[in-house]
Image (cartoon, helix red, strand yellow):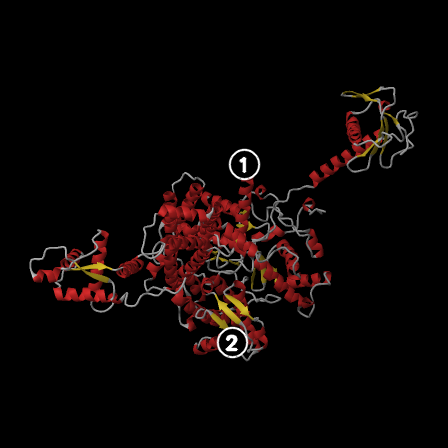
Amino acid sequence: MEAMRVPPEMFRFTTGERAELYVAILHAFGEANERLETALGLDDVRGRLRSLGRLDPLDDKDLTAALGSLRDWRLLDITQNHAEDYRTADEYERRNLQYSLTKRGEAALAGVVHAMGVLASTGALQTAVLDAIADRLGELVAQLGDPGVPDRRIFSTLVELEGHLEALRGNTKQFNGELQRLLRAEGPDQETFREVKSATVAYLQEFTTNLEQRAHAIANRVGLVEDRGVVLLRHRALVGAELPPTSGGDPAVAWLELRRARWEGLRAWFLPVDGGTPRVQQLFVVARRAIIALLQVLDRITESRRRSTSAAADFRELARWFAVAPTEEDLHLLWSTAFGLGSARHAHLAHPDPELVVSSARWVDAPPVQVSALLRSAGRTERFTRTGRVRDVAAVKAARAESARAERAALKAAWDRLDTAGGTRLSRFGRLDHEVLERLLDLLGRALAATPDRHGVHRATTGDGRVEILLRPPGAQHEQAVLRTPRGVFTGPDYDIEIRTPGGRAARRPRGPAEGAATTG
Amino acid sequence: MSNLANQLVIAEREEVARAIRLLLATPLIGARTAPEAFDLVRRRREPVEKWFDYYCGWSLVVEPRLGYARLAKVRVADDPTRPARRHRTGRAPFDRRRYTLLCVVAAELLGVPVTTVGLLADRVVQASAVDPVLPPFDTSSRAERMAFVDALRLLESVGAVDVVDGATESFVDSADAKVLYRVDATLLMRLLVSPVGASQVAVPADEVPLRFTELLTRLSRERRYGDTDEPASEVQRNLWLRHSVFRKLVDDPVVHRDDLTPAELAYLSSPTGGQLLRRAADQAGLLVEERAEGVMLIDPDGVATDNRFPDDSGNAKIAALLLLDVITSAPGPVAVEQLRTEADALLGRFPKWAKGYRGEDGATRLVADAVDVLKAFGLVRLDSGVVRARPVATRYAVSRTSTDDVEDES
């Protein structure tokens, strides 16, 4: 934004001893303008001043002089009114002059009103504003997608959006200003400040909750609108705006330029074009920093109220006590009492089950805790931790070891039983234990799942790779193999089968695999 | 789902219990020195705060942003075996000089947000010079500088001062050392936990030694239990009984019944007292051992303690355990002389024990150190050359039946 240059003398009326009168007069004109009275005569001005609460008498000369000054500063225009009937020359002189606000006068008045507004107002961060921005953007997306929506609606939505953005900017600016003042201020009335500050912390925390989600939603919608075309948006809004004609050139150019600038402002807040940090992010940072700073200030206030200056005095007094304490032990006692920094001290050895001993027993009658025998004999301990909780696991371990051993033995037996020590027929197994059959089925399944090589031999190993099976399809006989187990009968094609187990005992041959076709690897 | 919920409840219970015991061991936990412990306390702050407040009347302040948690352990100390210690190998206890300097330094630091070691030393010199009770501080003496550094290092370790540049240790070698500190005045003030400031009970310096015990009591007087002058209300009395009993229980290795006042004893023996004791211990992950002669809370994990016994960390502790066997098996009190003979035998049995115990009076020193260990755990009393076992001592006695032998786990 280029430097602002206010026309000279524009705000002259706000200073000097008659400033109050000038402001009141301009205010009167402003009021009249709102009622669509654009020109006021001398008596009208006086009447309006009175209705605004200025009751002290004001003679014509002073009033005329004041109006004259305002005209000199180009805030008022004087026109002559010839339309009325004047009965006397005096009356004509008094009443033929009409005053009306110039553009500059309007601006000057607006400036003063705004300044007063800023002074009186407090900034606020409202999540409602953010929500409103998101809502308007959402509406724009919908409206742009629908050619049936009148341009006026787009115009009004856009104006609303800009209004909310303006509110966000203004509020943030003011709030930030206030926040910085609050952080600087060390009021004489600490209680009030404490309250204001803690309230501000709560307020900020409230605001920052979900701030990121909201900002994200807005950024998303900005993107959506741009997908539909911002140029189109501006164009349709321009049509909807129905700008009045003015004397100096086409107002549309300036209007569009302003819209473009505002849109850029929106992007700067939520989705910067250059991919930089969105301003709303800075808002977040400022808020967070302020929360921390305020909490620290609060902390300091609390602390200082509690024992501020006396703390130093306490330390000095303690130093004296330490200097003259009677014994070494007293030093340590004073340290513990005043500073309370010492550790607790507890035993760590306990009975495995403390409930076992009744509480009325004497220590001497209760069983002693288990102190490492190694500690007594060799002067070192095997580091029992959590002695109280450890269960006796020896029995469990033994039982587990036993069952694992049995399992291993059963498995070994099953493999031994299955080891064919050379090729055989499936039917040769004849009778099997159920568990052994399960092993066999597992192996068969693995073998059949494997693709046969070019001789039609299926080859597979168990998961651990220790047992290997070779399977060749049954001959032309199509005989059925029948295996019996205590639980039932298994039938299937009679494959040529060879199972090799680790350390396979080629010497011992299972029941008659003798004349099975001798297969080699 | 319910399984997950159960898991979470168990996890929370364990974390709360651990946080309580961590704070018992270290009443000031800094986020920088012990990030995990601090994080645990921060997360479980509410139940932990309540536990301390209810049972002990101790307040816990957690400062998530400033990065420390402070448990204000208020009680009149009666155990001199937990001194401030130097931050050096050996961790020798603070002596009179160091304690005095610590306080003067703390007082001077309160006034300045940032300082250097040189400026601080100057201020201490001036402060000592104007106070007739304090000995002058002489920066030209290496021993003095060492004491000064020890005091500063303690403040550093608790986070009350923060070294921005340089190392405090360098001041020992040269008084011109450049070390820059930032001071945390709030934390500095929080180092003092006594409810009454020392300056408020100030007495003339020459009376301090005579009235020392009284001063300690006056420092710890808390208004909420009622003044000693006027009779306290029933509510205040009950509150005081609960808090005073639990302060001893959670802080001391063993509480013999004769350590308690009749009122405290009655409270602890009442059904309410017993119930609370069990609940408090359960929440803190401690075990209760209650016997006819007293009560102790045991921390099987050894978290809430500065020291362990029985333990093999040091010859004195092993000697303590073996001498305790002698003491508990003797029919009556044992003379220190007698223990010395035993110690001689031990030194013969363990030829590798530290050189420190090898000299002329090695056995004497070993006995002294061992008895200190036993005293620290409330196992014995020592008066005028005679060591007396306290009832609790027999819980470490040699097992009387062979089946109690420790089995080898591996």
Comparing A84 with B249, the one in front is: A84
Same chain for mark 1 and mark 2? The answer is yes
Residue B254 showing in the rendered view: no
Exactly how many numbered labels are in the figure?
2
Residue B118 got which mark?
2
Residue A239 got which mark?
none
- Residue that label 1 marks: B2
Quadrant of residue A98 within the rendered picture:
bottom left
Amino acid bearing label 1: Ser
Quadrant of residue A310 within the rendered picture:
bottom left
Quadrant of residue B309 within the rendered picture:
bottom right
* Lower position in the chain sequence, tag 1 or tag 2: 1
Picture residue at 81% right of the left edge, 33% below the top: A460
Residue B207 placement, left or right of A97: right
* Chain of the residue displaying label 1: B
Per the model, the C-alpha gap separating discs 1 and 2 is 62 Å
Relative to A190, residue B205 above or below: below
| Position in image of residue A55 (x %, y %) | 14, 60
Residue B307 placement, left or right of B354: left
Tell me the SS state at disc 1: helix
| Position in image of residue B83 (x %, y %) | 54, 64
* Chain of the residue displaying label 2: B
Residue A72 showing in the rendered view: yes
